[in-house]
Image (cartoon, helix red, strand yellow):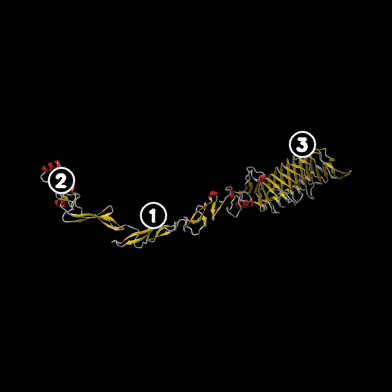
Amino acid sequence: MRRLGFPVLLALFSACTVTTTGAPCGSDLNCPSDQGCGSDGTCSAAALACPGHSESGECVPGTSCDSGRLVTCSAGPGACSTGPVASDCPAHQQCAAAGGSASCSCIPSRCGPGTPSVCTPAGELASCAQDLSAPAGCWYEASSAPCADPGTVCVESGGAATCACPTADACTELDATRCSPAGDQILRCLPVVAGSACLAWQPGTSCADGGLVCSASECVCPANPGPTFVADPVGGSPGGVAPRPTGLLSPVACRFRTLTEALAAANARGAGSTATAAGWSAAVPGGTVLFSEPGGLVVGAGVTLATDDPAPATGHYAITTSAALTVPLVEIGPGGAMSGFEVRNAASSGDGVRTSCPASVDTLPVSLSAIRITAASGGTPVARLAAGVSVSGHCGASMSDVIVEGAGTGLLVGSAAPGIASSAVAPRVTGSTVAGVAVVEGTLTFTGGTIDANAAGVLVGTTGTGAPSFSATVTTFSGNSGDAIHVVRGTVFTDACPYVNNGTHVHAQPATGAAVSLTVQNSAGPAKMTGATNSAFRLLAMGGGSTLVLSGNEVVGNSAIQDYNVATGQRRGGGLVFTAPFPSSVAFRGNSVHQNSWDQVLVAASLGTLDLRG
């Protein structure tokens, strides 16, 4: 029997009565020593007498769960009970408590009627089954296994599961290609993993790594909005095949292979566009990048053909064609420009560079700078350009540092109207078989430069019916086997121009019905007129409609080979030769004529008046 402590005894003795039977309890420890905790949760002597009673007291009748097991306590007589008894739930069931009691019920599963299979959390395919031995006929996942194809995944749909290929980026044709959505790479249709029948679009070739974009399953050059379109015969790419060049400077593969293609793109964009030659470096064999074009080049209105040289020069880039052209090698529209090239003739007989301004509104001049035209081909027979530069139509040409070598006519000006002006600064025209310069119509002005070693220097109005104009300042005329200047109609003006070792320095002889205006001034000192083989001046039958101004010239050391009949017989004049009829206006001032062979001034005429005073 459990003893009460001393303080408790004092309390009991001091109280009138103490009630213990029926007190609530959870075990015998809550009850007096002569009582036990019964199945009803109260203390009683009867509970202590229950068979098999233990200090934990009688269990409370009912069911509960303990560590997943179903625990059962059965009611006995009075305060007694039997148990507790723990038991495992059947297969596919688990203990679950609800409403103060517990029972074994089916383990929750996605399996059920109409669901033959499911996907496990691990992504395996599981078949479903029903345990009919259970009261509720529990459904469960009977077996599971990974998908047989390593590329498939378990997918549930319509109450069933199956192993299926991924739908993201799926494709159907092995090794097919397409562009990525971003357009930066080529995708290829390949197994998602080795050994799988599932196909998906996967990265193949990166176009972006080479500065390209993907189009129609190819790595191609990005679009070029202009205004510059670059050509490079070494690093550029041919048109029509990948990477389909667009004329971008970078990457190098996006440059056109020919100037023909670059100009086609520039011309299509219109005025303000530029076709630019690139590719030169000090390591280029021969020192020159050569563009071998399929035919002639066309520079559209307002379009520029140039090079990537910081300062245009003629030594780095050259243009040629093996075609035997009778049309120009380069044709330039109004407002067009060209700079920094050598034009090499190989087999052509047309013009080297020709302006093309057919309409009366095409008045913007063409610009040519740092151009060298090698007009005569090597080999036998020699192919020769008819004209190095031909100015025609309704626009003039503004030229600087233009060199023409070996043409039929170096520079031909045959403008559509007399008021159309062209100019040349520091030109050099040499080796022409007909003439260095021919002015048929329009106005041509030279500043500096040389016209040397041609069959004839400048022909003014020798063809056509117009009244052209030529003027030159500080331009050297030397070594021309015929006339340095021959004027038949129109106007000639030269100022401070040296004349050296020509056939005749200046020859004026108007055509029938025509008149000329000739001024030669300040050819003296270092710019003197010397070394002519057939008279310094031959001023023949200029006629009443012509004017002549000779001022400040030094005519010295010239000879003559042509005889003229005078009253005393045949004479030659190494200095000046005049024949009638004389010009109506003559100004002869400050000239020095001396030390010429034969006559210094020969007047071969029987009629007329010639006043050379001054």
> Which dot marks residue 525?
3
Three-letter amino acid code at disc 1? Ala
Q: Label 2 neighbourhood size at 10 Å, few (<14), some (14-19), many (20+)?
A: few
Q: Is residue 134 above or below residue 337?
A: below
Q: Label 3 neighbourhood size at 10 Å, few (<14), some (14-19), many (20+)?
A: few
> Within the image, what quadrant is residue 506 found in?
top right
Total numbered badges shown on the rendered structure: 3
Q: Secondary structure at mark 1?
A: loop
Q: Label 1 neighbourhood size at 10 Å, few (<14), some (14-19), many (20+)?
A: few
Q: Nearer the viewer, mark 2 or mark 3?
A: 2
Question: Farthest top residue?
Answer: 525
Mark closest to the chain's N terminus, 2 or 3: 2
Task: Give the CA distance from mark 1 to mark 2.
Answer: 60 Å
Question: Farthest left residue?
Answer: 16
Q: Secondary structure at mark 3?
A: helix
Task: Give the CA distance from mark 3 to mark 1.
Answer: 107 Å
Three-letter amino acid code at disc 3? Gly
Q: Secondary structure at mark 2?
A: loop
Residue appearing at x 55%, y 49% in the figure: 210
Residue underneath mark 2: 2
